[in-house]
Image: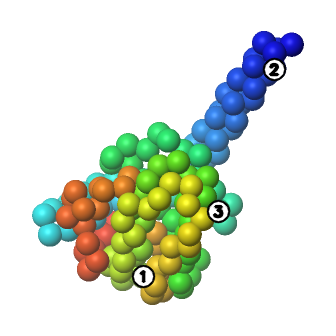
């Protein structure tokens, strides 16, 4: 009986992980370029444009590589709020205005935290990348996004 329950739990985990991969695969992937003080940096980003994609974000994902991320595109500029609930990887959250300039960066966010992370100023785009990448690449407020997909 215990063995059967373990097999059922394991099967459920694989089904859940497969469903999460399918959900992520539904989003289009584009190249986003950031110009910082030390050059251009390209990220392959999944684009979260729908409300459901934005709500899901990177929750449950552990497969992000250093040159990948997720770009959230909102219908209009405004204060944007994020949290790390159900997100197992620490992230840098980069808030971008309609002028494609970086307005704020929330560095090294805490996995699974329910603390609210605010853009503090109106933004239309938000880029999430692995924690530490913004500092490592010299990306800072005032830098420009060259290409928004």
**Mark 1 or 2, nearer chain start:** 2
Crowding at mark 2 (Cα within 10 Å: few <14, some 14-19, many 20+) = few
Say which residue appears at 54% left-offset and 78% top-offset.
80
Could you tell whether 55 is left or right of 148 in the image? right
> Mark number for residue 55?
3
**Residue 57: x and y, percent?**
57, 57
Say which residue appears at 42% left-offset and 65% top-offset.
93
> Mark number for residue 5?
2
Q: Which residue is mark 1?
A: 98
Q: Please, which colouring scheme is shown?
A: rainbow
Where is the C terminus found, in terms of image quarters?
bottom left
* Disc 2 to disc 3: CB gap under 8 Å: no
Q: Nearer the viewer, mark 2 or mark 3?
A: 2
Say which residue appears at 15% left-offset and 62% top-offset.
39
Q: Check disc 3 and report its element: helix, strand or loop.
A: helix
Q: Nearer the viewer, mark 1 or mark 3?
A: 3
Q: Is residue 65 above or below residue 53?
A: above
Asked if residue 120 shows in the view, the reply is yes
């Amino acid at each position: 009986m215990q063995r059967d329950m373990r097999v059922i739990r394991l099967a459920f985990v694989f089904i859940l992980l497969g469903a999460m991969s399918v959900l992520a695969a539904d989003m289009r992937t584009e190249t986003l370029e950031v110009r910082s003080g030390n050059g251009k940096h390209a990220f392959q980003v999944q684009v979260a444009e729908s409300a459901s994609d934005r709500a899901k974000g990177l929750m449950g994902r552990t497969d992000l590589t250093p040159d990948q991320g997720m770009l959230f595109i909102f219908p209009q500029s405004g204060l944007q709020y994020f949290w790390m609930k159900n997100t197992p990887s620490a992230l840098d959250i980069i808030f971008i205005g309609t002028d494609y300039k970086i307005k704020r960066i929330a560095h090294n966010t805490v996995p699974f935290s329910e603390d609210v992370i605010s853009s503090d100023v109106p933004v239309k785009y938000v880029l999430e990348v692995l924690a530490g990448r913004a500092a490592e690449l010299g990306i800072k407020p005032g830098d420009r996004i060259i290409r928004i997909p």
